[in-house]
């Protein structure tokens, strides 16, 4: 009762003192998000107002320096990391008044192939200059900073996705969620794993504010921590405020992710919100001193604001004890011990519940409620040790959904998430009771089966998974079909090393995809050698452009009515210094998989246009050029086709002189992005040719809807044209249909005069093949242009 009465008395005192509502500005480190939920709650619920405060919450940006804002008086309070100590040592008299995050959110994110710190050698790294604990982490683990290539930090996780950088410092409340939504696999390196555990999001102010307005500081701290207590108990309400009242740029799922992560970092059930642990700060100070960031004379006590409330209560209790006398003192001791025992018992129970909740959240995927990557890696290491020491076998299945990205592109992330949850339920229904299913990435799952299971039984499980996953899903009133590719590896047969087992399962899964998807594949060392060879080819591809190993050849396309050369198709060739001439069908799939198709495609486009501009000025003003593009380029033009239109216009080439060839299956799996890009080609005067027509399953309605200008009859129809009645009928029907749709027709693979004559009689517009010429070097193509005569 005494404590409650005093609290009400203090509340009345604060209310009287601040009746005029002091204006207070709090500078946040980033834009409005759940990271600052407690302050929104205190504002929305009137906690600040009750204590006579009018608080303005100032959102931050990527360029905001919170310390400068507070030091210059633009803000009265700020939210910063443990670098507040460093700023104080530089002459800025800051004081920390509350600790919000008991664990720091800073970490490193790395591309998936980077497994350990030993893999960092020579890698490109973006490091926030103020991340002192990350620098200490690297130094403690023996990483020489001189062995790394540092780049200016962009704070954009897309630089990891686009392979601009290998590793970047990040915030666990921000970048991991963004990368997960992009289905981009990544690895996490945390200082906490090696005992470097700083606090984060510390609420601080200046000594001047404390000396001049101590009561206001006490009131602001009290209301803010009360707001944090509410926010952690009612996260969904605060999320709604963020969306409705603070114009947050983040969606509800992202804010919910932050709320969950904040709970882990704050540990509100274990530690009082705002609690300043002096001994932990003493360790932080010593750590900074080891780094040379603080001198040995740094006064930590001067940097920490410790509330007088506890000392005042102690004085009141002593005074009360003296007034009551010695007799009541002994009774009070007995009562106190009894009460503390009950509270301790309750606290222990609550602590156990809290630990259990934190453990569950730390090991659970928030979307599917399956085990997450962290749990899977720990479990894999445990099983691998048992396989090594006790020879206990187990199986690892690596599952990757086929064409999941196209579902996300077509229906949006909301329905993509719905699909992931439905797949998770089906997978659980397929597995034996002792199997452990985890979601380790956007559309990636793993299964661990920890018993001596036979290969035939594993095949049965894999076949069941394939059958269940490929059943139709209902998304936004549309039936959608996907499939899954599965890689299987066995321990200790294949390996007892966890990272090797993951690599082997991934290689087996990739082999399943390369064989047509929707299948399973066991790991074998022959397959591993194939994977190593593919990786070596990828590495060689990275150097090929730098070493100028690529060149173009040009195959003529002729007008079948006049027999005149009217067009060339540009064809990429790779002259490897030791492998010799590498065929396109051997390296283009590798280039698409690795993302190198962007640079290669850019080279082909620009080189062929430069050649076309030159030939048009020298030989024929009507000459045209045809260029092949990959589905990967078309599906992500902002990534793979940057600056193409500007380059085309700079060559002063007229509309219709350039056409891009796409494969037929793009039409059947086209997305809105593909449709928009094809329309953009039309708007810039670029023609589109549909290659290998007749080998896929194109719907004729797409030909007009997507602005196709040419179709190319596949060589398989032309090959037997002279001997097969069916081939003649098909070719004639294709040509007739195309002309009715106002499309021109190019026939590929013409090798005989008879084939050319038949196609000409059907009205085919253009022809291409060895009858006219093989792919030519620049010199041979120029000689042909000069003669302008093609002999049949």
Image: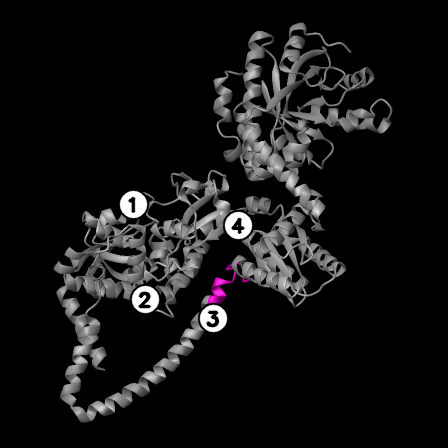
> SS for tag 3?
helix
**Which is nearer the N-term, disc 4 or disc 2?**
4
Q: Which residue does the image show at 63% across and 57% down from the upper left?
A: 496
Foreground mark, 4 or 2, reads 4
Q: Which mark is residue 751?
A: none
Local SS, label 4: loop
Of 769 and 529, the residue lying toward us: 529
Q: CA distance from mark 2 to mark 3?
A: 19 Å
User: Can you see residue 481?
Assistant: no
Pick whichever, 553 or 442, lies toward us: 553
Q: In x, y percent, where is residue 502?
A: 60, 53
Q: Which residue is mark 3?
A: 356
The reply to whether the C-beta atoms of the residues labelled 4 and 2 are less than 8 Å apart is no
Looking at the picture, how far across and down is residue 742, in whole percent? 66, 23
Asked if 287 appears above or below 356 in the picture, the reply is: above
Q: Which residues are magenta?
A: 359-370
Query: For mark 4, does the 10 Å Cα neighbourhood hold few (<14), some (14 to 19), or many (20 or more) residues?
Result: some
Give the spatial CA distance, label 4 vs label 3.
29 Å
Q: Residue at x 72, y 63 (%)?
A: 453
Task: Give residue 64's mark.
Answer: 1
Q: CA distance from mark 4 to mark 1?
A: 33 Å
Q: Position of residue 498 (x, y in %)?
A: 59, 56
**Disc number lying in front (3 or 1):** 3
Q: Are marks 1 and 2 in contact (CB under 8 Å)?
A: no
- In the displayed structure, 19 sits above or below 593; it is below
Distance of label 1 from label 2 (alpha carbons) = 26 Å
Name the residue carrying label 4. Answer: 115
Disc 3 to disc 1: CB gap under 8 Å: no
Horizontal side, residue 234 vs residue 8: left or right: right
Q: Residue at x 58, y 35 (%)?
A: 539
Q: Which residue is mark 2?
A: 273
Q: N-terminal of the two: label 4 or label 1? A: 1
């Amino acid at each position: 009762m005494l404590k409650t009465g005093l609290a009400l008395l203090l509340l009345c005192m604060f209310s009287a003192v601040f009746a005029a509502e002091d204006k207070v500005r709090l500078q946040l480190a980033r834009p409005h998000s759940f990271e600052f939920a407690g302050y929104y709650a205190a504002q929305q619920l009137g906690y600040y107002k009750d204590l006579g405060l009018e608080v303005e919450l100032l959102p931050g940006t990527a360029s905001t320096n919170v310390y400068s804002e507070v030091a210059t008086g633009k803000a009265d309070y700020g939210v910063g990391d443990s670098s507040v100590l460093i700023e104080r040592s530089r002459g800025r008299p800051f004081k920390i008044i509350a600790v919000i995050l008991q664990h720091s959110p800073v970490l490193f994110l790395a591309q998936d192939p980077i497994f350990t710190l030993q893999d960092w050698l020579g890698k490109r790294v973006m490091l926030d200059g103020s991340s002192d604990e990350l620098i200490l982490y690297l130094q403690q683990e023996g990483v020489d900073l001189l062995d790394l290539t540092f780049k200016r930090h962009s704070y954009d996780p897309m630089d990891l996705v686009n392979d601009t950088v290998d590793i970047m410092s990040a915030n666990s409340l921000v970048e991991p969620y963004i990368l997960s939504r992009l289905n981009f696999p990544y690895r996490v390196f945390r200082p906490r794993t090696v005992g470097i555990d700083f606090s984060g999001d510390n609420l601080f102010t200046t000594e001047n504010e404390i000396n001049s307005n101590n009561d206001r500081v006490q009131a602001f701290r009290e209301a803010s921590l009360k707001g944090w207590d509410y926010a952690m108990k009612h996260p969904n309400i605060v999320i709604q405020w963020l969306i409705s009242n603070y114009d947050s740029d983040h969606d509800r799922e992202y804010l919910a992710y932050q709320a969950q992560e904040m709970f882990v970092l704050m540990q509100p059930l274990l530690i009082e919100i705002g609690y300043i642990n002096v001994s932990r700060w003493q360790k932080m100070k010593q750590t900074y001193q080891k780094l040379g960031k603080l001198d040995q004379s740094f006064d930590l006590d001067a940097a920490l604001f410790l509330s007088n409330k506890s000392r005042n209560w102690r004085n009141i209790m002593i005074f009360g004890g003296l007034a009551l006398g010695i007799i009541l003192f002994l009774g009070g001791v007995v009562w106190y011990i009894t009460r503390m025992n009950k509270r301790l018992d309750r606290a222990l129970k609550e602590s156990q519940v809290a630990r259990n909740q934190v453990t569950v959240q730390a090991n659970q995927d928030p979307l599917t409620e399956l085990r997450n990557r962290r749990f899977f890696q720990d479990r894999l290491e445990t099983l691998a040790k048992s396989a090594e020491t006790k020879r206990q076998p187990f199986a690892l299945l690596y599952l990757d959904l086929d064409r999941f990205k196209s579902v996300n592109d077509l229906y949006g992330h909301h329905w993509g998430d719905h699909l992931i949850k439905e797949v998770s339920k089906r997978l659980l229904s397929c597995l034996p009771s002792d199997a452990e299913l985890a979601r380790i990435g956007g559309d990636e799952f793993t299964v661990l089966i920890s018993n001596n299971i036979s290969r035939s039984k594993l095949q049965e499980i894999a076949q069941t998974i394939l059958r269940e996953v490929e059943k139709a899903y209902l998304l936004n009133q549309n039936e959608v079909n996907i499939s899954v590719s599965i890689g299987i590896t066995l321990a200790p047969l294949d390996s007892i090393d966890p990272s090797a087992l993951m690599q082997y399962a991934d290689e087996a899964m990739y082999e399943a995809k390369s064989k047509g998807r929707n299948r399973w594949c066991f790991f074998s060392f022959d397959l591993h050698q194939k994977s190593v060879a593919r990786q070596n080819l990828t590495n060689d591809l990275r150097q090929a452009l730098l070493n100028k190993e690529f060149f173009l050849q040009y195959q003529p396309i002729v007008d079948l009515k006049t027999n005149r050369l009217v067009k060339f198709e540009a064809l990429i060739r790779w002259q490897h210094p030791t492998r010799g001439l590498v065929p396109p069908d051997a390296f283009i799939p590798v280039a698409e998989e690795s993302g190198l198709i962007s640079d290669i495609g850019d080279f082909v486009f620009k080189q062929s246009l430069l050649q076309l501009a030159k030939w048009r000025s020298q030989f024929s003003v009507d000459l045209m050029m045809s260029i092949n593009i990959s589905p990967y380029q078309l599906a992500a033009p902002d990534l793979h086709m940057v600056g193409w239109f500007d380059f085309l216009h700079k060559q002063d080439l007229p509309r219709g002189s350039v056409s891009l060839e796409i494969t037929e299956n793009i039409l059947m799996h086209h997305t809105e992005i593909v449709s928009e890009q094809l329309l953009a080609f039309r708007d810039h005067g670029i023609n589109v040719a549909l290659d290998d027509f007749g080998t896929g399953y194109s719907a004729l309605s797409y030909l007009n809807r997507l602005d196709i200008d040419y179709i190319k009859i596949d060589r398989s129809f032309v090959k037997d044209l002279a001997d097969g009645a069916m081939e003649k009928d098909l070719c004639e029907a294709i040509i007739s249909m195309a002309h009715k749709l106002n499309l021109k027709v190019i026939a590929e693979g013409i090798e005989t005069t008879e084939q050319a004559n038949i196609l000409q009689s059907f009205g085919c517009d253009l022809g291409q093949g060895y009858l006219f010429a093989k792919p030519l070097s620049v010199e041979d193509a120029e000689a042909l242009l000069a003669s302008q005569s093609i002999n049949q």
